[in-house]
Image: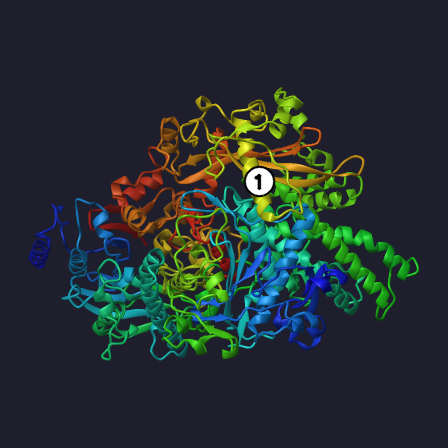
Amino acid sequence: MPPSVSDLIPEPSVRKLRIFAFDPSLSSQYDTAAIGEIEIGIPWERNLEAGPVGEYIEVVDVDPSSGACYHPVDLNNPWLLAQNGLAPSETNPQFHQQMVYAVAMSTIGHFERALGRVALWASHRTKAEEEAYVRRLRIYPHALRDRNAFYSPTKKALLFGYFPVSVRDANNTPGTLVFTCLSHDIVAHETTHALLDGVHPRFNEPMNPDVLAFHEAFADIVALFQHFSYPGVLRDQIARTRGNLAGESLLGQLAQQFGKATGRGSALRDALGHVNPKTGVWEAVKPDVHALDRATEPHSRGAILVAAVFGAFLKVYRSRTLDLFRIASEGTGILREGEIHPDLSARLASEAARTATYILQMCIRGIDYCPPVGITFGDYLRGIITADYDLNPEESASYRLAFLDSFRQWGIHPRKMRSVSVEGLLWPSGKEAMDELKVSMDRSALGSLLQEEQAIDTYERKTRQSTGAAKFSTWDLESDRYKTWKGMDNNSAVLWSWLVRGRGKDLAEAIGIVLNGEKCPGTVFRSRTTGQPAVEVHSVRTAQRRSTRGALITDLVVEITQRRRGYFDPKVQKKKDAQKDIPREERGDFRYRAGCTLLINPADLEVRRIIRTAGTITDDAELERQRRYLTEGGLEPANAFDSAGRALSLREPFALLHRDTEGM
Amino acid sequence: MATRKAVTKKTAAKKTPAKKAAAPPAAHQLIPPPGTVVVRMYRIGHGDCFLLAFPGTDPKKPVYLLIDCGYKPGSPGMIDKNDVKDIRDITANIREATGGYIDVAVITHEHQDHVNGISENTFKGIRIGQAWFAWTEDPADDLANGLRKQFKDRLLGLLDARTKLAAAAEKDVLNRVDELLQFEIGGDREGLSPASLLGLMGADGKADPSKSMNKLSMKVFKDKAEKGIKYLRPHEKILKVPGAKDIRAFVMGPPRKLELLETLDPKGGEEFHLAASAGGFFAAAASGSQDRGPLSPFTARYRIAKPAVGKPFRKGSFFAEHYGSEPTPASVSESAPDDADWRRIDNDWLLSAETLALAMSDQTNNASLVLAFELGVGGKVLLFVGDAQRGNWLSWSQADWKDGDSKVTAKDLLARTVLYKVGHHGSHNATLNGVDADTYPNLSWMARSSECAREFTAMITAVRPWAETQKGWDHPLKAIKDALLAKAGNRVFQTDTNVDDIKPADSGGGKEWQSFLKRRSGNRLYFDYTVEI
């Protein structure tokens, strides 16, 4: 656009693009065609190039198995701007490019809004173990000839497959091709894997039965509630079934239908309900406190987490729509026969969408309040509750109760918890943790981190600015993402030096970090610079919280971990633990990690929250727990040949997990 | 014994270059003591070979039934590194033990580690009465013919994918695909040898899976069968083991339902089936010629030809800038370049070959002939499952057998099982775990009466030192072995473990253990286990 014109016309804030609301199979069916396509608004990107290649996403449409590339779509083409992008089409690869871009950007938007900061992808680790900035997530819409789609952590890319329909059923014609990149939920699901990896790069290391399940379930939760958050999607369906009070089974059924979108089984949403074979009617499943004890495999466990969050959503939705039903039924709560009023279905749909949006934000915010490794569902519940409490201490208590209630009904509760109440679930504040251990740290110590220069010459991770001294830098949320990334990199170094060599040492014990090598088994990794137990500072990012006066405060979220070699054979472990000077290159059979997440308030120099892993790096019992999980059948082998442990070193950890969903 | 000389000569001739060989166990005919059945488990390597000696209707003439004869090349040498066995030691013993006549020869499924010991040469001097195969081998069965066609297409597609993987230097995946292909092709060499591939060459020089080494091995039994070939379907007529006294055989698998054959690892309600089209779809691309245009799902107007890997895109074009073809220079900038090589996906689609190969291997395993031998009507049961995996297991209880006016159920047969030949080297999914109340057959359905439980014994055909170090395979899986040890009170045979090293959990062992000790013996070639009828 010529600059002179842009002076007169405000820049758009939103770009509207058309997508398949579910997947092509639904829009080609007569009775669902009306809701088959929707138009969604995604943040306007000024410099969007053909691809599309924007600030966050680059769609690169190469199809190696066909020996072809497909011309990249230019969404700034005036003709496309005038018609809100290409019309949904299975046969036009440019529409495929548009759809993956639109859905992925929509997911990114939810993350940025919920977390209050720009989204960053996981860094690329070079062969020299340096970290490089990855500006954009790459999306390959036609990468594989396989019924599979996955996020590749090494390529920082989403790979989507396509395959011919092989089963003849009501929705499919054999021989036709199915494109996984045309399923809204699959795209949102995979994008979420990438976003979560950007926040927690260690969340795909299976340390306990919940870790892999969490990655899958979280991705599915985001896909599901993002879908529910589009205003138009639910209205039609709610009207059609006259919102049979609260419409619970309808929403559950819809959630499942979305998941069934061709290309991915609904395994993760199986726990929501099923069709009763006797009556042929879909029924919601009743929560089961013992379900989690029986489920060992990631998908069945993940399904329970999805069901628990969905249960919380239904509780809130029900309480928020009861009044509407009363108004519409003259106070009786029982609707008359016949179609319901369009106004009512519109209001019900918008309540559902609003509730879905809030639940989605809660779920995303929760990931800032999790331990850095080895997450459990119980930890996640505490994360969701604490994050929401910190942001809205007064307002959304009913949401928190709904979560608590639903999780309890599904038997999800934190380990070693004395009581389960909203109060009791909040992660301890820094003061509480330090009191308990009788450690004290005055504000000036924390002040030294934020204000004083730290010598970072011995920082163990190689960065390009690892010489001399550096100060903690601040950055604002709207700033260039590259600067944000650099700032984080710098601050990790500063924080490391402060914690290991500076005044932060006093804090180490309270947060479960072991600095004294004499207290450590030989298997704990040592720093290449100090020779003491290595300390990794994963990230220094920001999270938002509301002050008692209602002001928005930005806390720092810091993740610190330590690592130790684990051996499948307990006898070898014992021997190695006693051994001094294990060569650096020796990796052991698996990695045991421990550490903590800290939330620091830079304004009043206070440690707001301390979130520790179950044990410290010297904790043999926790190491043993992980070993048993890996070797004694907890982690299932992927096939008839490999040991379960091979999952620890797979090139594409998500590829396998996703294939499993389809039983391939 | 008359035949003894011949054996000794053969072994001696064979062994000249080998390391010190233990004295060959005395070879003589295997005669089960009156009122018993002897199960001889050959320590053939990582693979199966069982000889069952049943009492005959003629008391002087036992009936011999052989189940499989194969091993993974390389594995026999790691049972005991001072005692390198040769397959001919095993087959010579079979010859002596049976007096040169096998009444029934059974092949459970077409995998290298079940058939590669069978050749004209190794079975010279052995006659065969009946040969039993699963219905999947039946040339007159349409379902079987369809499966074979599909199998052939997949195998050819995978051979092509293999060539592409080799060209793309994807060594790890290539090795894994080769290992899996080797199961399907057969032969007695390690790795996918030129010889084994050559075995696949037809007259026109094109690969022809109907000439695979496995097929040749199976043909030996088919040709030798003097009293005909039986193709067995599950849940049909209860079979009599010909010539044996009161021994009946129940065919439990393989299932006739395709989805069960394909069910590898069902999770959740909805199952996707790897139908022929999906495999063929991949294979078509894998075997694509230079002109692969028409394979693309999109019309030409959207397409730009993708240059061969390593060849550049048009300079300045979108794909030159955002995908690239050159290796990324070593001096990395702080920000990943747009055309970084580590982000490319040129070969990723080929990696699906491994999944396909795994699926193919699992499907062949699932097509295992599963036999339950009943010792006298209503008596104890010996269960030989081949390498049946989950889908096969699930099918056992989906129908019953008619026995005169009454019926026999799979649950009943399992409840009477006193000997279980563990599926697929004790791997994941080849022994189902569960509880008695579960609706699918599982380990806890076996040996339900206290009488059977006291006797229950398992046989694992695995050479762990080989599997672990040579292939990185977890055979047997610890969880499964632990469950078996617990269930069988430690009465678990394993190919790589000398009988004397099978120890009771508590120091003395009880009455059951004493009985077990009396009924088992073994040497470097085999274990003998006697079951009273």
Number of disc labels: 1
Quarter of image, res B325: bottom left
Residue situated in front as seen by the camera: B489 or B183: B183
The N terminus of chain B: image quadrant: bottom left
In the displayed structure, would residue B12 be above or below residue A487? below
* Colour style of the rendered protein structure: rainbow
Q: Secondary structure at mark 1?
A: helix
Specify the quadrant that holds the C terminus of chain B. bottom left
Q: Find the residue positioned furthest to the front.
A: A4
Is residue B408 visible in the rendered structure shown here? no
Place of residue A410 in the rendered image (x, y in percent of width and height, measured from the top left): 66, 47
The x and y percentages for residue B204 are 24, 80
Residue A408 at x, y = what percent?
68, 43
Residue at 61% in and 25% down: A448
Image position, residue A203 (x, y; %)? 54, 45
- The answer to whether one can see residue B265 in this image is yes
Amino acid carrying mark 1 in the image = Met
Does residue A507 sit above or below B453 in this rendering? above
Whether residue B175 sits left or right of residue B13 in the image: it is: right
Q: Nearer the viewer, residue B139 or A117?
A: A117
Residue sitting nearer the eye, B406 or B491? B491
A639 shown above or below A488 = below
Which residue, given by chain and number where applicable, does mark 1 sit on? A488
- Chain containing mark 1: A
**Callout 1 crowding tier (Cα within 10 Å): few <14, some 14–19, many ≥20:** many
Q: Is residue B1 above or below residue A578?
A: below
Left or right: B349, with A273 as reference point? left
Residue lying furthest right in this view?
A330
Question: Residue, x 87% and y 55% (percent of image)?
Answer: A323
Residue A109 placement, left or right of B290: right
